Amino acid sequence: MKIIGVIPARYQSSRLPGKPLADILGKPMIWWVYQAAKKCEKLDDLVIATDDERIMEVCRRYDMPALMTRADHDTPTARIHEVSCMLDADLYLQIMGDEPLIDARAFDLILPDTLPEDPYYVAGVTNIMDHPADVIDFSNQKVACNARREILLISRSPIPYPKGTADFEYEKITGIQLFSKKALDFYAATPKSALEKAEENDLMRFIENGHTVHAVVSPYKTVSVDTPKDVDIVCDILKQRGATAQ
């Protein structure tokens, strides 16, 4: 079984243009993500997938393997599918390039020891949300699962709605997701589904078409960087941890 880690790194961002190159304690954000991801011993290979020569230049400068992919991908899953057409593997681990606090121990929770029987295998790491404000934040994509930890729905709205009881924990999907090659091929060959369009979550394409998406809860929490304020938050956390860019 071969597993490749892929870090999608798109240059354009409406709220933070050039986001992967945002300065964090003297190094670009994508450097922090790569350094964290390469600690995972289960990955046979690790590559950055970008759409911009400026990011490629930074990857060359810091000796980080990278591939140039098309600029017209509107989801990270589509970019990973393009990588799967260039690099052969059984499983592809998506590691979002805007989460510099990512912890490679979360990868061990989602990466199987043997190849899953389902040829269309898809899984995603989730985090329990601690604060009520996070639950109503539309940027946090909440998940509802069945008893087998299979995702039923992903929504930017608070789900489930606490009409009968509030005695449960809200979960959000993270940027760590796992796909088989056949799952990525299915994704690329299938039109966007209705709920996917409404919620802007590409995992719903699998769910709405009858494929299982497994949810794996991780205690290792991170911060997605979408704004300059998020950059400041990440820098403060790294300083508190005593982290340095060496």
Image (cartoon, rainbow, N blue to C red):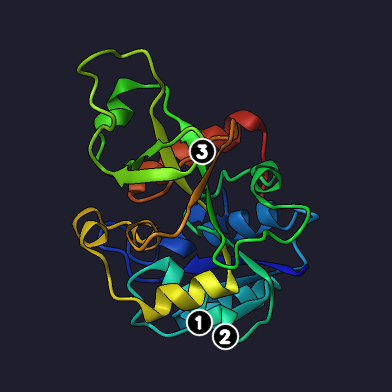
Q: CA distance from mark 1 to mark 2?
A: 5 Å
Looking at the picture, how far across and down is residue 198, in whole percent?
Answer: 19, 56
| CB under 8 Å between discs 1 and 2 | yes
- In the rendering, at what x and y percent does residue 115 appear? 72, 61
Confirm or deny contact between disc 1 and disc 3 (CB under 8 A): no
Question: Can you identify the residue that label 1 sits on?
Answer: 82
- Give amino acid for label 2: Cys
Residue appearing at x 67%, y 39% in the figure: 243
Q: Nearer the viewer, residue 228 or 34?
A: 34
Residue type beneath disc 3: Arg
Sooner in the amino-acid sequence: mark 1 or mark 3 = 1
Q: What residue is at 57 percent from the left and 61 percent from the top? A: 121
SS label for mark 2: loop
**Residue displayed at 67% across by 75% down:** 65
Number of other residues with Cα within 10 Å of mark 3, as a class: few under 14, some 14 to 19, many 20 or more? some
Q: Is residue 148 left or right of residue 40?
A: left
Distance between mark 3 and mark 2 Cα atoms: 30 Å
Q: At label 1, which amino acid type do we have?
A: Glu
Given residues 175 and 57, the one toward you in this image is 175
Q: Is residue 47 left or right of residue 155?
A: right
Res. 149 mark: 3
Q: Tell me if residue 11 comes above or below residue 71 in the rendering.
A: above
Q: Helix, strand, or loop for circle 1?
A: helix
Judge the density around disc 1: few (<14), some (14-19), many (≥20) Cα neighbours within 10 Å.
many
